[in-house]
Amino acid sequence: MKDEKLINIAKNSARNAYAPYSNYKVGAALQTKNGKIFTGCNVENASYGLTMCAERTAIFKAVSEGEKEFEKMVIFADSGKMPYPCGACRQVISEFSKDMKIIVVNNDNIYETNNAKLLPKQF
């Protein structure tokens, strides 16, 4: 799938985010190696440690449907701040792919990288 289409899917997913505390809505679109797409959004909780990020939501949805081989992920936030994956998300991503293409997008920028660059010397 073209990156532009995956970016639009991530943008649409961000609309479903539950972010009453930070008001920072993030959406993710994960493409498997066989072309399936799984989406995720962040879901906050008053006990902030229980918050789930968009990236892990998409990955856990894919795994729960039997998919474990991923090609690329788009992470989008309707903000000036780039939505780079947190440490927990980087570790979960590395469980399934050491070098999956990751596209980070906000209102003004697009940054392409991979998890090996975001999490060198992975566990």
Image: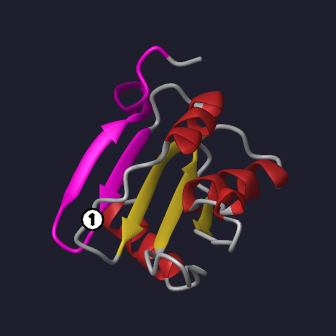
User: For residue 74, which quarter of the picture?
Assistant: bottom left
Q: What residue is shown at x 64% (from left), y 58% (from top)?
A: 58
Q: Quadrant of the N terminus?
A: bottom left
Rendered location of residue 87, percent (x, y): 51, 39
Q: Residue furthest left?
A: 108
Q: Is residue 115 above or below residue 83?
A: above
* Badge 1: residue crowd in 10 Å (few <14, some 14–19, many ≥20): few
User: For residue 70, which quarter of the picture?
Assistant: top right
Q: Quadrant of the C terminus?
A: top right
Q: Residue furthest front?
A: 47
Determine whether, in the image, residue 64 is placed left or right of residue 89: right
Q: Is residue 45 above or below residue 54?
A: below
Magenta span: 101-121
Rendered location of residue 103, percent (x, y): 34, 51
Question: As shown in the figure, which amino acid type bears the numbered disc 1?
Answer: Lys
Q: What residue is shown at x 62% (from left), y 47% (from top)?
A: 34
Local SS, label 1:
loop
Rendered location of residue 118, percent (x, y): 38, 33
In terms of depth relative to the viewer, which is nearer, 45 or 117?
45
Rendered location of residue 4, percent (x, y): 31, 67
Determine whether, in the image, residue 3 is placed left or right of residue 47: left
**Count of marks, rendered view:** 1
Q: Is residue 91 above or below residue 89?
A: above
Visual colour scheme = secondary structure
Is residue 107 a member of the stretch shown in magenta? yes
Q: Which residue is mark 1?
A: 81
Is residue 100 a member of the stretch shown in magenta? no
